[in-house]
Every structure is written in structure tokens, then in C-alpha cells.
Amino acid sequence: MTDKKQTESVRAASGMRKGLTNYGDTGFSLFLRKAFIKGAGYSDKALDRVVVGIANTGSSYNPCHGNAPQLIEAVKRGVMLAGGLPMDFPTISIGESFAQPTSMFLRNLMSMDTEEMIRAQPMDSIVLIGGCDKTVPAQLMGAASAGIPSIQLITGSMLTGSHQGERVGACTDCRRYWGKFRAGEIDEQEISAVNNQLVASVGTCSVMGTASTMACIAEALGMTVPGGASPPAVTADRIRIAEETGAQAVKIAQNQLTIDKILTADALENAMRVLLAIGGSTNGIVHLAAIAGRVGFDIDMQALDRMGRETPVLLDLKPSGSHYMEDFHKAGGMATLLRELKPLLKLNALTVMGRTLGEQLELDGPGFKQDVVRSMANPIYPQGGIAVLNGNLAPGGAVIKQSAANPELMEHEGRAVVFENMEDMAARIDSDDLDVTATDVLVLKNIGPKGAPGMPEAGYLPIPQKLARMGVKDMVRISDGRMSGTAFGTIVLHVTPESAVGGPLAHVRNGDRIRLSVKNREISLLIGDAELAQRGVDNPVHEPVAARGYRKLFLQTVTQADKGVDFDFLRSEHTQGSTPKLG
Ligand code: FES
């Protein structure tokens, strides 16, 4: 190849020359593309620049992304300051409480949208603007599969409100006040007044729910600029982070810092460490498993549990603690946390800044006195927030957020009170005729990946009303579903395999005895193996199917919780083994 041809070939692989539409004549394809974009007023000089795509997830249905217009403006400013050309484009946006049957049903669709639009359109790097629970994992999954230089921009948390002098924020306080209302402790007027105060601005939930968890995980993975996780949505700090993100997106494009160099085994291990140390949402494990699967890793759940035994919860945020995200930001955000966790981190992991995590922590310098991130010597919970359970009820594992559970119930044996599905539960749970006591174990079937479908956050079963009125605040609850990271209680989740594919949970009956021992990491149905097998023969499970459309694709290809509830055909073809690898 001549020098001239080589230069042309390199130029062809970048900017507006990238990924030309196929008309059988590349010269014509570029000519046509430029003609159309010039219709929007662009000059040749602008079109010669490095192109930074910006995934715009603003939507009237997603107030957690309500600051998207301001963020896009700031990202564009950053891109222009660094000499690039910003090009924003829409993708699917998912607002947690606006998605039916559940946002998780749509996460994989959003990841496919993100991946394919990155592939389809000419861009040298991509800024992913995400925040609400499923959006950040969907974007990281999609970008990991697309493989170009990528950087995550978090929308940021909402501000807290105030009800009768008490500070409140979504959504731990949503659940607390709703529990009071159900128990008859507050009336219609007060619950309506609280409703006005729980969400004081646009932005993501203000506690350590899934959105905050994924923001911290994104920074721990090295996928955001430093300090990118914590600034609230409506602050100047958040806008400055957006501007810096735009500028850095140009650099990672110029340096070809592709996402596979960031999403390594070490980065995933750091993310798991952080998940445990922040008392993060159990959903974080599912999403991390899906992201890991896109780059060829399996999460070793037993190793994760061992990691949890040596990783205390340091972050004092609701629901495990008492503060909110804006307090975490004022306390220095992730730099403060990572500084404390430093002895447990893989410091050689590369970040989107082009430096290692260790080098970044050196640059961040010393900390200051604050009361949101505890020291290793004085944690808010001695082990990691999440424990992995096993036993004949969950041969593929289950999880419990032990830091938000009731210590008195974590070693418990009780009688099963079984609901066959969500409809059954809704019809009977508040009935005065329900045969239930406070020491029973509530079991909900068919809310797993295929069961509902989409593994809804229905694992936080409400306390039966007649017990709630007697002052019962917590019971052991078990399901194959998920739970919001903002929720609390002694709740066993992600039972694998799920009941809808014939997991043992499908064969639990009213009156069976169930044992939970978090200390021994055990969740057991106290019947013999032979009887459990016979129940399977007597009552075979027929897996749900759909006639057409996305639901059909979902039911045919969705994996179980331990594989991230991703579609099997979206996982990487190239296996890299399991993570974490502990000595
Ligand atoms: Fe969007 Fe909580 S509802 S982050």
C-alpha cells in the first residue's frame, strides 16, 4: 500500500469517514453523508474533527434524567474545547416507575439499542448519559459489546426534601412512609403531603439504591472521570463533570483507549469491592454479572461471598445507614471511599483518564474529616453488604442484603406461607383470613427472569396488613425476584434457578419448614431430596412462552440471575474465565 493510500485508509477509519453506509461506492457514500450533514449547517472544517457521540437519554418519562439537556450542552462544550465534534443522538430511556411490566424487562433492549446505534453511526468515542437504575448497566453492556472508547456520565442524584422538619428522600423514605400508611399510623392527608416532598428535584434516587450503586460502580470500574459518581443532578459540580467528560471523550478517541482496556478482571473486582463496601443494591450483582458477561467473564458467586467477609460496609448511607448521596458528595465522594478501601483494591486497573486507579488516588491527595465514609477500623457493618446463600432451595445461589436486614431474623426457621405469583399475593396478602404469623416465612414464586417476566422488584413483599397493624415491621421473605436497593428487611432474593424454569422454589408448599442461616450462608427447604424430586415429577413446570415480538425473544434467550439476566446471544463469544480471583 502506498503512503498516500495508507493515510487515506486511516482517515477512512475515523470521524465522519467511519462506518460508511453501503451503496457499493465508498466515495459516493461519504459525498452523500457530507451533503446531508451540511444541510444542518456544518462546515468541512467541523466535519474533519474527531467525532464524539453522546447517547441522549432525556425523556419526559424519566425525571431521573431531567437534567439531560444541561448535561448535553456541557458535554458538547467540553468536546469542542478539546477540539472534537459532538454529535448527540437519542436512545431508549427507562424511568424506573414508568416501565411496565418492569424496567428490567427493557434493560437488554436498551443495551441492544445502545450497542447498535454506536456501531451504526460514525463516532470515534461515546459519552453515555445514564442515571436511573437500568440505564447505566444497559449502556455499559451495550458499549462493552460495541467496543469503541467509551465514557459514562451519570445524571446525578436528586436533592432531599423535608416533611414536618424531617429530612426525606426517595426511595427508602417512600417505603417507610407507605409502611406507616398501611399500618394506619398516618392518614391520607399526611401521605399526600409526604408525596410532595420525597423527590425534591430531578435526578436519581438520593439513597444507596440501584442508581447510586451503579454510579459508584461505574466510577470504580474506571468508566467515569474522577468524582463522576456523586455530584447531585442540579449542581454546578455535575455540570463541570459533564464538561470534563466531553473533553476526556476526545482524548480517549485520540488515544484509542477502547473499553476492553478498562473493563478488565481487575476493574470488575474493584467494582465488586465497592459494591460490598457501599452497602450497594443487590441489583448491582446482577448488572455486574451482565457487564462482565459482555467482556467474557463469569462472576464467581462463592468468591464474591468470600470477598464480602473481608470487606466491611464503610458508607453510611440509607438504607444501610443514615445519610444521602448529597452528603456523600460533600464528604469527598468516591475518592474518600476508595482511599479507605485502598489496601483491598487492584490499583493497576486503568481508568478512562488513561492513568491507573492507584495513580488517580495519589493525585486525589489526602482526605479530610467527615462522617459519611467510615474507616476500616470503624465500619457501619463488619462484613460486605451482600451475602451469597446456598442450599437445596437455591442450588444456583441466592442473595441477601445483610446490612439492611434484621439481625434477629438472620438465623431463623419458620413455616412457609406461599404465594404462587404476584396476582395471588396481591389478592390474599391483606386478607384477614390469611393464615400467617410474624414468625412465618413469606414465599413468592414466579417473579424470576422468565417468571414475571423480567425479574421485577417485587421481592420486597409487604408485611401482611393484619400483622403490620400489630406492629410487625419485618419478616423473612424469599423469592426469585429482585428488590429495590432502597428497600430494607430480611429478604432473600434471586433464588436460582427460578421457579418458572422448575427450580426447587416451584415446589415449596404452605406449611413446609424453611431455614435461613446467614451465618452459615444457608437457605434450605426442610424436606428430603426424594420428596423434593417427587414433587417435581408430580407437578412438572411448563416454562412461559410468548407468540411474538420482544417478549418472545426475551423468554427464549434470557439467562438466570447468576449470568446477569442478559440474553444468551449477547454475551461475549470469548471466555476469559471467572472473577474475582482470590488468593
Ligand atoms: Fe430513577 Fe430511582 S427511580 S433512580
Image: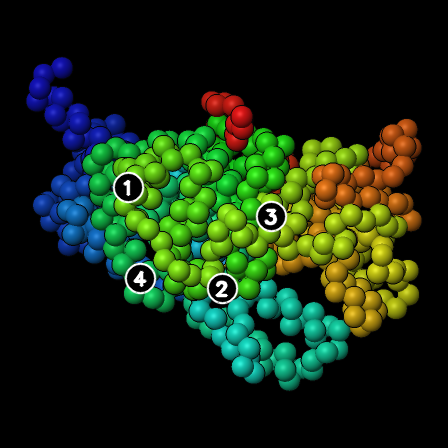
Q: CA distance from mark 3 to mark 2?
A: 21 Å
Specify the quadrant of the image occupied by residue 423. Answer: bottom right
**Quarter containing the N terminus:** top left
Q: CA distance from mark 4 to mark 3?
A: 32 Å
Q: CA distance from mark 4 to mark 1?
A: 18 Å
Residue depth check, mark 3 versus mark 2: number of the one nearer the observer: 3
Label 3 or label 2, whichever comes before in sequence order? 2
Q: CA distance from mark 2 to mark 1?
A: 28 Å
Q: Residue at x 54, y 37 (%)?
A: 289
Type of the residue with mark 4: Asp
Label 1 or label 3, whichever comes before in sequence order? 1
Q: Is mark 3 within 8 Å of ligand 1?
A: no
Q: Residue furthest top?
A: 1
Residue behind mark 3: 382
Type of the residue with mark 2: Tyr
Label 4 or label 3, whichever comes before in sequence order? 4
Q: Is residue 196 above or below residue 170?
A: below
Numbered label attached to residue 237: 4
Residue depth check, mark 1 versus mark 3: number of the one nearer the observer: 3
Secondary structure at numbered mark 3: loop
Type of the residue with mark 1: Met
Residue behind mark 2: 324
Residue behind mark 1: 353
Q: Few, some or many C-alpha atoms within 10 Å of disc 1 (few <14, some 14-19, many ≥20)?
A: many
Q: Few, some or many C-alpha atoms within 10 Å of disc 2 (few <14, some 14-19, many ≥20)?
A: many
Secondary structure at numbered mark 4: helix
